[in-house]
Image (cartoon, helix red, strand yellow):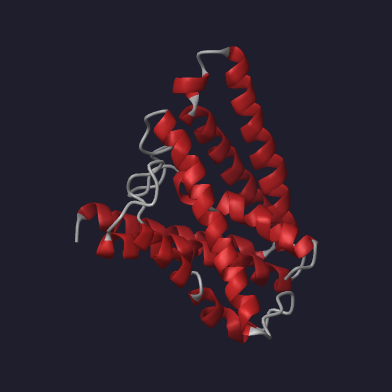
């Protein structure tokens, strides 16, 4: 067990404790914390893309505005909508976030254990086995939270539950690859150093910032 791995585990435990506390205590604390997260992610997004996009003002403005619109309007608004006003909606948001987290854990653990063929050239460390691990681990939150009886999610039929978890995991993995593409484009390993053992905040929420708006859309059109 390496020192880097130990740092990663400790950081994850502290971070998850803070995140779930902010979600469940009350909406004001949640929104304040979310605003801080978005600000840090936006800063890291701009820093990440300086190497390639700062050479031309038009490209730099475009990439900054793109990050601004997506993080401050699409992601923030979606998270606020999903969190809602009551305990039920807070549990719903926690459920979705937990799917994202377990999907990421599954990809990391199974990818490390089995390795095998690479998933894509965009991110050389991503493997097919890791992707499968992400899908499998994304099912775990259901078993952890099913006793909470979240009325906003209808999982009476097993395939509803399977499709929902797999879909959220898929969007998470795509989001991870999108941010990985920009990191590779700029020849940068991590988006920052704020989280010991992990890198930047954007490194940890790259899948989440795509999964949350998608989950909000599914709720809005009443698919789940």
Q: Is residue 99 visible?
A: yes
Q: Which residue is found at the position 52% from the left and 82% from the top? A: 143
Q: Nearer the viewer, residue 19 or 163?
A: 163
In the image, farthest residue toward the top? 56
x, y percent for residue 15: 46, 57
In the image, farthest residue toward the left? 1
Q: Quadrant of the N terminus?
A: bottom left
Q: Quadrant of the C terminus?
A: bottom right
202 vs 96, left or right, is: left
Taking 82 as reference, is 143 above or below it?
below
Q: Is residue 13 visible?
A: no
Taking 158 as reference, is 108 above or below it?
above
Q: Which residue is found at the position 72% from the left and 74% from the top? A: 88
x, y percent for residue 61: 63, 21
Q: Nearer the viewer, residue 12 or 100?
A: 100
Q: Nearer the viewer, residue 134 or 93?
A: 134
x, y percent for residue 55: 50, 13
3 vs 75, left or right, is: left
In the image, farthest residue toward the right? 221
């Amino acid at each position: 067990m390496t020192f880097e791995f130990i740092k990663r585990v400790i950081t994850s435990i502290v971070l998850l404790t803070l995140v779930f506390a902010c979600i469940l205590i009350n909406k004001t604390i949640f929104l304040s914390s979310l605003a801080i997260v978005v600000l840090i992610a936006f800063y890291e997004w701009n820093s990440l893309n300086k190497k390639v996009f700062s050479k031309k003002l038009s490209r730099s403005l475009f990439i900054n505005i793109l990050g601004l619109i997506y993080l401050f309007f699409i992601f923030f608004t979606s998270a606020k909508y999903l969190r809602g006003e009551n305990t039920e909606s807070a549990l719903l948001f926690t459920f979705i976030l937990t799917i994202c987290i377990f999907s990421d854990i599954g990809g990391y653990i199974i990818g490390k254990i089995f390795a095998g063929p690479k998933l894509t050239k965009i991110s050389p460390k991503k493997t097919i086995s890791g992707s499968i691990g992400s899908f499998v681990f994304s099912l775990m939150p259901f078993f952890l939270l099913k006793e909470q009886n979240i009325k906003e999610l209808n999982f009476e039929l097993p395939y509803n539950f399977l499709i929902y978890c797999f879909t959220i995991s898929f969007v998470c993995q795509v989001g991870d690859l999108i941010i990985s593409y920009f990191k590779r484009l700029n020849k940068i390993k991590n988006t920052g150093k704020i989280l010991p053992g992990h890198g930047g905040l954007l490194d940890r929420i790259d899948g989440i910032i795509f999964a949350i708006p998608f989950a909000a859309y599914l709720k809005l059109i009443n698919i789940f």
